[in-house]
């Protein structure tokens, strides 16, 4: 007697190969059916009639992953009640590179399901929060480090504090935070600042850095979690200070670039993967101490009228224009070569040593945070109420 699990005769129905024809026909039909199901699920409203036809037709719904999405629809029980579900699903499906290379597909797919669950759980508990593209880049970092249960608690706290301004209905607060970038650069290196203003590059190139805590743009997970160590221990605006030191570190590249918006944007948006992270972390801390947010707030607010009006998929969408008359500064020429500054803090404190500060970064001088670290910890809560970052 033939066993129930034994294969039947070759036929176009079961898709087994016969002269290389039937299996190909089966695969193409399967792919087409999956595409039709996906389209039906993506329709607004969901095309339940089409899903019923797919479920009844040969082969049914094909995979358990698809059944998880379709069965609730067939019973008129929405699988997720969140308005952001479809966008979250698309973003998570595109997040393959955020998982360790070589991870088995089954394990990765399980983590992606957990990632979706964490995001939707946090949004459901906090209806005042609005999902943004890039949020999943932050959540996946916590998921990979601490697991689903702890990640949910940490991400929820982070979303209502450090990330709160990014999760408003509009991008106004995000644009305002980006406006701190140019004043920081201006304090350290007026030449780079004026060049960027003249090129009309704006600050869109740093958007994905800021709202993903650099998780979207750094390929080495070790560098991502190192920055998360730093950002979690500091003031919520620290990522914009770190963005500034990256630009300052690349001073020579920037000034040698053609002074054109598209060219400068392209250069700055491509972050080198071999940055001296410890040096830049130290310098970002030093800049925060030297130029705290309260000192820059007025200038950042004055840039609001110049801020970009739209952000989409981290593409160049800048409509920013510089002031009608760019601020020009006469830089004092040193008669003699200045001796090296004893520390990065001293370099930042002396306006005439601004360029030397960046040179030290280029040479890879590592400066310990020292006393600045204590100041950063103390100011993490001190400045926050003034900026309404901790509602």
Image (spheres, rainbow, N blue to C red):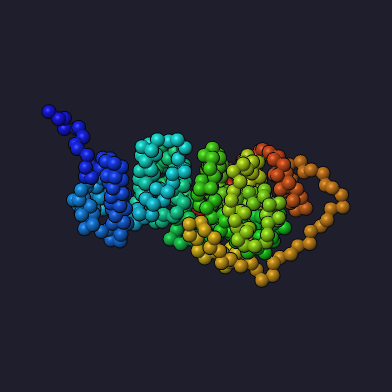
Residue 300 vertical position relative to residue 241 in the rendered view, above or below: below
Work out whether residue 293 can be spotted.
Answer: no
On screen, residue 264 versus residue 155, left or right, reads right
Q: What percent of the width, then of the height, locates residue 335?
A: 87, 52
- Residue occupying the point 56% across, 64% down: 318
Q: Quadrant of residue 323?
A: bottom right
Residue 46 vertical position relative to residue 215 in the rendered view, above or below: below
Residue 12 vertical position relative to residue 40 in the rendered view, above or below: above
Camera-side residue: 152 or 13?
13
Q: How many marks?
A: 0
Give the residue at the far right of this rendering: 335
On screen, residue 20 versus residue 100, left or right, reads left
Camera-side residue: 156 or 133?
133
Give the residue at the far bottom of this rendering: 324
- Residue occupying the point 19% across, 32% down: 5
On screen, residue 129 versus residue 240, left or right, reads left
Give the residue at the far left of this rendering: 1
On screen, residue 343 versus residue 334, left or right, reads left
- Residue occupying the point 68% across, 59% down: 258
Residue 346 vertical position relative to residue 86 in the rendered view, above or below: above
Q: Quadrant of the N terminus?
A: top left
Q: What percent of the width, then of the height, locates residue 184?
A: 65, 55
Q: Quadrant of residue 22?
A: top left
Give the residue at the far top of this rendering: 1
Q: What percent of the width, then of the height, locates residue 7?
A: 21, 35
Camera-side residue: 127 or 273?
273
Camera-side residue: 223 or 7?
7
Q: What percent of the width, then of the height, locates residue 146?
A: 44, 36
Work out whether residue 170 can be spotted.
Answer: yes
- Residue occupying the point 60% across, 61% down: 262
């Amino acid at each position: 007697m033939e066993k129930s699990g034994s294969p039947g005769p070759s036929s176009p129905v079961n898709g087994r190969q016969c002269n290389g024809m039937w299996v190909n026909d089966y695969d193409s039909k399967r792919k087409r059916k999956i595409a039709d199901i996906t389209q039906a699920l993506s329709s607004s409203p969901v095309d339940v009639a089409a899903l019923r036809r797919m479920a009844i037709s040969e082969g049914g719904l094909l995979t358990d992953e698809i059944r998880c999405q379709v069965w609730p629809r067939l019973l008129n029980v929405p699988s997720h009640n969140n308005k952001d579900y479809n966008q979250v699903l698309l973003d998570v499906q595109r997040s393959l590179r955020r998982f360790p290379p070589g991870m088995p597909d089954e394990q990765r797919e399980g983590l992606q399901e957990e990632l979706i669950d964490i995001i939707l759980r946090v949004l459901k508990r906090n209806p005042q929060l609005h999902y943004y593209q890039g949020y999943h880049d932050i959540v996946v970092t916590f998921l990979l480090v601490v697991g689903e249960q702890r990640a949910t608690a940490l991400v929820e706290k982070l979303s209502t504090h450090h990330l709160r301004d990014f999760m408003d209905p509009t991008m106004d607060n995000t644009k305002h935070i980006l406006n701190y970038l140019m004043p920081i650069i201006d304090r350290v290196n007026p030449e780079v600042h004026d060049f960027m203003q003249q090129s009309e590059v704006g600050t869109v190139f740093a958007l994905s850095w800021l709202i993903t805590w650099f998780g979207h743009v750094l390929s080495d997970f070790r560098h991502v979690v190192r920055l998360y160590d730093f950002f979690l221990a500091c003031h919520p605006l620290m990522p914009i200070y770190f963005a500034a030191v990256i630009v300052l570190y690349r001073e020579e590249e920037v000034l040698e670039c053609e002074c054109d918006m598209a060219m400068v944007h392209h250069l700055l948006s491509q972050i080198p993967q071999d940055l001296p992270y410890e040096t830049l972390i130290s310098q970002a801390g030093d800049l925060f101490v030297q130029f705290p947010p309260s000192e820059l707030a007025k200038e950042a607010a004055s840039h609001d009228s110049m801020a970009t009006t739209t952000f989409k998929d981290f593409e160049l969408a800048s409509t920013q224009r510089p002031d009608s008359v760019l601020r020009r500064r006469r830089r004092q020429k040193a008669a003699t070569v200045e001796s090296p500054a004893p520390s990065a803090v001293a370099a930042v404190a002396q306006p005439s040593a601004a360029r030397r500060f960046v040179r030290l970064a280029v040479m890879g001088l590592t400066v310990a945070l020292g006393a600045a670290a204590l100041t950063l910890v103390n100011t993490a809560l001190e400045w926050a109420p003034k900026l309404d970052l901790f509602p």
